Image (cartoon, rainbow, N blue to C red):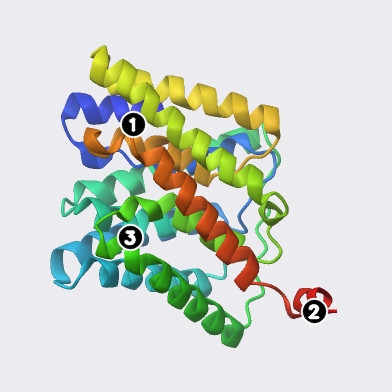
Amino acid sequence: MAFVMVFVAEISHENEIIFPEICALTIGAWVSEQQPWMTNKRRIFILMSLAALFGVLVVKYCAIPLIFQVCICFAFTGFILTLFKTNFVPIISACILPVYLRTESWIYPISVSTMALIIIIAQWLMEKYHFRPVNNFIPCDFDIKKQIIKWSKLLIVFGLIALIPFKTHQIYFLAPPLIVMFTELSNPKSPARNKPFYIVGLMTFASFTGCILRLLLNEILGLPLFICTALACTILFLALDKLKIYFPPAGAILLIPMIIDKSLLLKFPLEVFIGAIILSFCSIILFREKENIQNLLS
């Protein structure tokens, strides 16, 4: 999927087609035996399409500082996730990425919608022919009051963390897949919270793999970007299979180096490492269930 996406983007000279979160979706919808999100195929398509379209609209029509644009997108995704009673957090990256890249082209939301459709059709075929278990959707039992408090707290914490990176124009300390990771780890019931060091290492490894392959194969040897993408995905999937940790944001952070400016490639893995440490620490410490806090104090 990633190979074809980047191949089409290169031959058409439309970089807006490259959507790194598509690799995260394939990990969750195709590779992982148990889909990590409580959602169904219809919600995947609708939410991805809405998020991508909203991100482009913010860039085109909201003439406000970057940090406020990102916060608006973050709040919007929290709203529609609650409205659709799902924890399908990859839409956060779909919404925020065009803001980071200053994307105003309608090609981006069209591309995201098309690839989301391909993902869910392929998942349906895999389920029909028993290549993977059927994904039975059970809506999240959200308490509206608790959700408002949760997303308000997430927005405030994220806004405070983002002040320095955005002020210094080092926004990739908070790359969109890291924001997805932050949101996922803020859920006290997320299995990923039990292995924060593995998650930080995995995100750093994925970003380093994407950067080094683009530098060596694309920038130095002049090979097409889709070859870098295919090899990067192969290496990451082997690592995921070895670790038995199918963490979708790692797939998204793997492909970010394929779309950022080449001048950022050398420092991007370090930014991801630092950002992942800060965000994972804040999400685990600041977002606990009351029972866990009482146990900690006792």
Expressed as whole percent of the image width and height from the top left, the position of residue 54 reads: 29, 64
Res. 165 mark? 3
Identify which residue is drawn at 25% across, 16% down.
220
Amino acid type, mark 2? Leu
Answer with mark 2 or mark 1, whichever residue precedes in sequence. Answer: 1
Left or right, residue 51 beside residue 12: right
Expressed as whole percent of the image width and height from the top left, the position of residue 76 reads: 38, 72
Secondary structure state at the residue bearing disc 2:
helix
Q: Quadrant of the C terminus?
A: bottom right
Q: Are marks 2 and 1 in contact (CB under 8 Å)?
A: no
Above or below for 202 versus 298: above
Whether residue 116 can be seen here: no
Amino acid type, mark 3? Pro
Which residue is situated farthest in the bottom direction here? 145
Q: Which residue is mark 2?
A: 297
In which quadrant of the rendered view does residue 66 lie?
Answer: bottom left
Q: Which residue is mark 1?
A: 5
Identify which residue is drawn at 75% across, 77% down.
293
Density class for disc 1 (Cα within 10 Å; few <14, some 14-19, many ≥20) is some
Secondary structure state at the residue bearing disc 3:
helix
C-alpha distance separating marks 3 and 1: 30 Å
In this view, the mark in front (3 or 1): 3
C-alpha distance separating marks 2 and 3: 33 Å
